[in-house]
Image: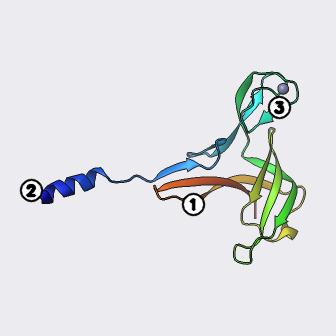
Amino acid sequence: MSGPERIARTGSEVQMTQTIPAVDYLVLGDDPHLVANECRQCGALYFDRRNACAKCFATSFGSKRLGGEGVVRGYTVVQRGSKSGPYTSAVIELVGGGVVKANLVGVTDPTLIGPETKVRLVTFDAGTDDDETTAVAFGYEPIGA
Ligand SMILES: [Zn+2]
């Protein structure tokens, strides 16, 4: 009797790998994108939740889907350890509005980045914890690179 019972219990404990966005404003799925809180009065965009707009002090916000493409407005190459290598932190002005700070993906040569470099949103697995939950982060990769 103990044999079949163990099998049944094991079957009920099958773990599904769960995928969650690393930040609240990243929406996953077939078409990953960012969502910002938009001030209904002046249109200012915020990624964090606000009680009042920092620009006009209005307290009403809506949800705005941001564009997946943008232009690099500034960047910093960050040198970490020799193993992880440098990465590029960039400020990206999104097509359709919104400015986001994120890492550039697949760019280690800063000479390939200009102030008008066009980029698009990409997502990648940032790590899996002990509960098989995979965090998905986002970055931007140059278009046409
Ligand atoms: Zn406002």
- In the image, 142 versus 103, the foreground residue is 103
* Ligand 1 lies under 8 Å from the Cβ of mark 3: yes
Residue at the spot of label 3 = 44
Which is more N-terminal, label 2 or label 1? Answer: 2
Considering only vertical position in the picture, is 38 above or below 101? above
In what element is the residue under mark 2? loop
Q: Residues within 10 Å of mark 3 (few under 14, many from 20)?
A: some
In what element is the residue under mark 1? strand
Q: Which residue is depicted at the point 75% across and 27% down?
A: 51
120 left or right of 99? left
Q: Residues within 10 Å of mark 1 (few under 14, many from 20)?
A: few
85 left or right of 134? right
Q: Which residue is depicted at the point 87% across and 70% down?
A: 111
The quarter in which the C terminus is drawn is bottom right
Residue 35 at what x, y percent from top left? 69, 38
- What is the C-alpha distance between the residues marked 3 and 1? 32 Å
- In the image, 55 versus 69, the foreground residue is 55
In what element is the residue under mark 3? loop
Q: Amino acid at mark 3?
A: Ala
Residue at the spot of label 2 = 1
Q: Which residue is depicted at the point 73% across and 38% down?
A: 48
Residue at the spot of label 1 = 127
Which is more N-terminal, label 3 or label 2? Answer: 2
The quarter in which the N terminus is drawn is bottom left
Could you say which quadrant of the image residue 34 lies in?
top right
Considering only vertical position in the picture, is 80 above or below 127? below
Residue 30 at what x, y percent from top left? 56, 46
